[in-house]
């Protein structure tokens, strides 16, 4: 073989790789996402994921789903979703794969496992969008692994709880390539409002800061309720009175009445919040950052977990304050005059 051809052959992999990247960049900027040309995958159909994925199905997207507990996926199957037997199988039938699972270890397994993971089955040019609250360092690792396979990865955790998921009004914190986030805007818009926070991992950092804010606000809310109760106030009237003043908050609107009704059904699990706050504290240690409110909230939520209340919603924090003060906001059972 002539020497010039040998040299060309030796450079072919690099030339092809550059061509592929340019082609994908062109696709990323010119192709619009729509139900007619985009197949969606979804992994994780729990309290949040089921509603979020449902919005995509109702918008007409072809969706393939995976969940470890198949019964939790049934509402989506009833809407027309297709069931796959592994994250790899989801990815092989999808252009964009969303995940929202429990813990960083779950994220690593469903996305990066060399045999069954999403990245092992996703075509070049595909997208991974992890909406789990997870570790910023893991988000960067996923992004690097995706890039090596000519795919894009976005970390896009959400805030807004079960109501936000049902109503399509979630706050979405996105980290990664801005062009990739922009390309997927039409999908994000079905679930809420996307906020671009910066490069890979920045979405996770924003969500962790969000959790820190929520944790201390929840402590303030339940402390105020316990104080009002011990002072002999009608707590419902008290909450209504402060809701339009400086103490009013989204958290009060979402959870004040639920707490009074003793409704501790999870919009967000205590177990998952303990996980989130633990990640926050780990990041604080790396930063040399002291956040005493965060540390206190994490200890109070850990006490709920120790009492077997980890599967309740985060508003169950009232139980920890009630135990500390040997009181209960629960209305006394009415006496039976005929007894």
Image (cartoon, helix red, strand yellow):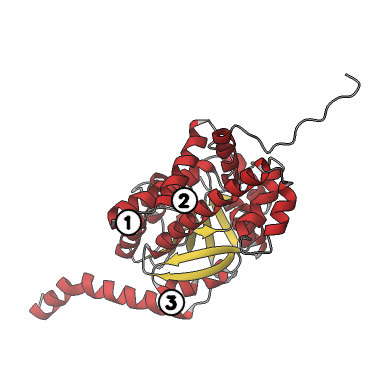
Figure quadrant of residue 263: top right
Residue that badge 2 annotates? 89
Q: Which residue is mark 3?
A: 27
Spatial CA span between label 3 and label 1: 42 Å
* Residue 291 in the image, given as x and y percentages of width and height: 39, 54
SS state under label 1: loop
- Residue closest to the far right: 338
Mark 3 or mark 1, earlier in chain: 3
**103 and 161: which is toward the camera:** 161
Which residue was labeled with disc 1? 289
Determine the CA span between mark 1 and mark 2. Answer: 42 Å
- Of the 4 image quadrants, the one containing the C terminus is top right
Q: In what element is the residue under mark 3?
A: helix
Q: Is 70 displayed left or right of 124 in the figure?
A: right
The residue carrying pointer 2 sits among few (fewer than 14), some (14 to 19) or many (20 or more) residues within 10 Å by Cα, namely many
Q: Is residue 165 left or right of residue 91?
A: right
What distance separates the C-alpha of mark 3 from that of mark 2? 24 Å
User: Looking at the image, is mark 1 or mark 2 earlier in the sequence?
Assistant: 2
Image coordinates for residue 280, horizontal then vertical, percent: 39, 52
Q: Secondary structure at mark 2?
A: helix
State the image coordinates of residue 145 (x, y, percent, origin top left).
31, 59
């Amino acid at each position: 073989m002539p020497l010039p051809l040998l040299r060309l052959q030796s450079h072919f992999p690099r030339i092809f790789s550059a061509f592929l990247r340019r082609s994908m960049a062109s696709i990323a900027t010119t192709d619009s996402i729509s139900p007619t040309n985009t197949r969606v995958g979804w992994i994780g159909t729990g309290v949040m994921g089921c509603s979020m994925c449902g919005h995509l199905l109702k918008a007409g997207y072809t969706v393939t789903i995976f969940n470890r507990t198949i019964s939790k996926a049934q509402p989506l199957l009833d809407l027309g979703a297709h069931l796959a037997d592994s994250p790899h199988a989801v990815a092989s039938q999808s252009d964009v794969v969303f995940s929202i699972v429990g813990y960083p270890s779950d994220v690593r397994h469903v996305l990066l496992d060399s045999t069954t993971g999403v990245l092992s089955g996703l075509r070049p040019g595909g997208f991974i969008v992890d909406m789990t609250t997870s570790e910023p360092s893991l988000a960067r690792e996923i992004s690097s692994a995706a890039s090596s396979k000519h795919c894009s990865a976005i970390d896009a955790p959400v805030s807004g709880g079960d109501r936000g998921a049902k109503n399509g009004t979630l706050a979405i914190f996105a980290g990664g390539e801005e062009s990739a986030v922009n390309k997927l805007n039409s999908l994000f818009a079905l679930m809420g409002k996307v906020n671009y926070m910066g490069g890979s991992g920045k979405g996770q950092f924003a969500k962790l800061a969000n959790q820190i804010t929520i944790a201390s606000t929840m402590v303030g809310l339940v402390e105020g309720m316990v104080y009002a109760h011990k002072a002999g106030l009608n707590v419902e009237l008290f909450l209504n009175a402060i809701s339009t003043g400086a103490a009013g908050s989204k958290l009060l609107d979402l959870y004040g009445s639920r707490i009074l009704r003793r409704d501790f059904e999870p919009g967000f699990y205590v177990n998952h919040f303990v996980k989130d706050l633990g990640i926050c504290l780990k990041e604080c240690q790396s930063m040399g950052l002291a956040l005493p409110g965060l540390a206190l909230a994490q200890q109070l939520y850990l006490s709920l977990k120790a009492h077997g209340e980890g599967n309740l919603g985060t508003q169950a924090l009232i139980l920890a304050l009630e135990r500390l003060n040997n009181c209960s906001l629960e209305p006394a059972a009415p006496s039976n005059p005929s007894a």
